[in-house]
Amino acid sequence: MNTPTLLGLCAAVLIGLGLYGLIVSPHPLRKIMAFNVMGNGIFLVAAVIARRGAGAGMGGDPVPQALLITALVVAFAASALGVALVLRLFEETGSASLTAPDAAPRTPPSESEV
Amino acid sequence: MPAVDPATPGGLLLVLAVLLPFIGMMLGFVLGGRRAQQVAWATIVIGIVLMAAIAHRLWVSGDALVYLLGGWAPPLGVSLRADGLAVCMMVAVMVVVVGIGVYANGDFGTPAGVREKRSALTFWLLLLAVWGSLNLVFVSGDVFTLYVALELLTFAGVPLVSLDGRGETLQAALRYLIYALVGSMFYLLGGFLLYGAYGTLDIALLGQRIGAEPVTWIAAASMTVGLLAKTALFPLHLWLPPAHAGAPAAASALLSALVIKGAWFLVVRLWVDVFAGVITLPSAQLLAALGASAILVGNVVALRQARLKLLIAYSTVAQIGYLFLMFPLAAGLDAAQLDSSFAVTGGLLQAISHATAKAAMFMAAGLIYTTLGHDRVADLRGAGRALPMTMTAFALAGASLIGLPPSGGFLAKWMLLSAAIATAQWWWVLVMMAGGLLTSAYVFMVMVRAMAPAALGWVPKARVPGYQQGAVLALALCSFLLGAVALLPVDVAQIGRTGLLAMGVR
């Protein structure tokens, strides 16, 4: 088994783990972590694709590397936004759950309290 | 035909169309407070001129506008390309942004002597951000720039949901963000796979090089699923109703009318321009089957809502379904060697008429909320007397959603119906008819209750300014009279697309 294939399989495992975590973890912070695991798997795919360009005599294909850096920055910003929302949600409601008080605010009585 | 389109005169206009809103946003952020609104309006006014110039250039040249960033040609460089589809969407977005801006002067204005609010500043900045990122979505000529544009759109859309900072809107925003992030990761994976297989990210080049092989199918499936989560197509729509119903009216209008259209437009770009030669009819049927489920489920659930804003949000879920009916119709027309642009234009018209109608409906709901102090569908009596202009607008927008002539919705559904009949796909006709009936049920339900006379001695809680009502009515009229584009001598949406379509021919 050569290195790109091994790394590609690692990427697939990371993506699968991340997706599993995203679906089954109820806590938003865990979901954000799982999103990062999944993201790392995808970035690894890009890195493997860049590595394949090394056959042409270069150290690697620079285009996927450039894309990878951009995508990393975007994912970082997204995680920061997500964590900020979780913190604010905790400040406002005292819990950072996505599920529990879901049905409560939509009922008409809370309308009159506002 | 050359492999890559050379830059055309006027291409620089596209760069300006993308940069202008972001320049305005940053300027507004720096000047801050009450200046943000003035900066936003100055930007919008310049934007109108710019949009007119782009539309004029497209009309005169009869071909797509192209700009190569830094003079680098694809496959290495990044091109901006505005064909008829893109320019139509850009103009529609401009109209809706102006309408929402006029409305938001009331809700997010900062009159002299009043302490400025953070939500107002944020709203004006995000309005410009949504507008700018949508322009980038429409003109991007490569798959990765589209990813960046999508992420910008998400980052602009998520805070709009939680503009008032209440717990449940923060929750809705967080859920929206998670759906959107997973969606963009899937999209990114598909983009990387396409680059790995074909060595380019340029849409036109990919359309030429792409072949029917496993890596293309995986990339197409992954990108499509990711975008469906962002567009909120059934069954990935769960985040939409709380997010769109919980936001302030102007933000709801922006989210429901425009933000979801960004990801939808990308699906169109991919399926029509990139994967045109690879798409099989069954896969297109699957996409439309999801759309059909969205139409039926969204409309039925909308009928059962107690609150007007949630009703309108579920109506959005249903209307998104119509946007996906065009894919098997276009594929079917292609397979029959007929002109598939008919179905694509129908889908585009549906997107534009829904954008204008839904913005008008959400803003009408906002005015009703201000006037009555609540938006319970069961106690809307008196709204018709207090807000005659707004209820007229609601009815006109509803007529467009139902598809009554001469509205834009009618023309769009007529084109889709004709395409369905021409390709002998009668089941989509049944779905569209049933969807129209269900839509009319909830529009009439709201209208009948709102027209009931108010209780004796009832006075409105607050008066709403006339210009807000005017903005709502103007957008509803846009949607209602959009059917008049049938009178145009050429199919504007298809300008500059002949080259791309020719590549998809088998």
Image (cartoon, coloured by chain):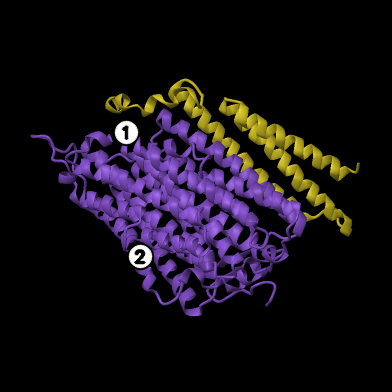
Chain colours: A yellow, B purple
Q: Dot 1 surroundings within 10 Å: few (below 14), some, or many (20 or more)?
A: some
Give how far across and how far down residue B411 sits, in percent: 39, 63
Residue B80, percent across and down?
A: 59, 65
Residue furthest right in the image? A1
- What residue is rendered at 25% in x and 42% in y? B368
User: What kind of residue is marked 1?
Assistant: Ala
The relative height of residue B113 versus residue B279 in the rendered view (above or below) is above
B446 is higher (above) or lower (below) than B407: above
The answer for how far apart the CA atoms under marks 2 and 1 are is: 32 Å
Q: Is residue B280 visible to us here?
A: yes
Residue B482 is drawn in which quadrant? bottom left
- Going from the N terminus, do you reach mark 2 or mark 1 first? 1
Chain under disc 1: B
Q: Is disc 2 placed on a helix, strand or loop?
A: helix
Per the image, label 1 sits on a secondary structure element best described as: loop
Pinpoint residue B452: horizontal percent, then vertical percent: 16, 41
Q: Nearer the viewer, residue B109 or A109?
A: A109
Instruction: Residue B110: name its quadrant.
Output: top left
Label 2: how many Cα within 10 Å (few below 14, some 14–19, many 20+): many
Q: Disc 2 is attached to a residue of which chain?
A: B
Identify which amino acid the numbered label 2 is placed on: Gly
Which residue is farthest bottom? B60
Quadrant, the C terminus of chain A: top left
| Residue B31 seen in render | no
Residue A43 lies, with reference to residue B168, above or below; the image says below
The residue that label 1 is drawn on is B306
Q: Residue at x 89, y 58 (%)?
A: A57
Among all residues in the image, which is located at the extreme left?
B457
Q: Is residue B408 left or right of residue B81?
A: left
Numbered marks: total = 2
* Residue at numbered disc 2: B483
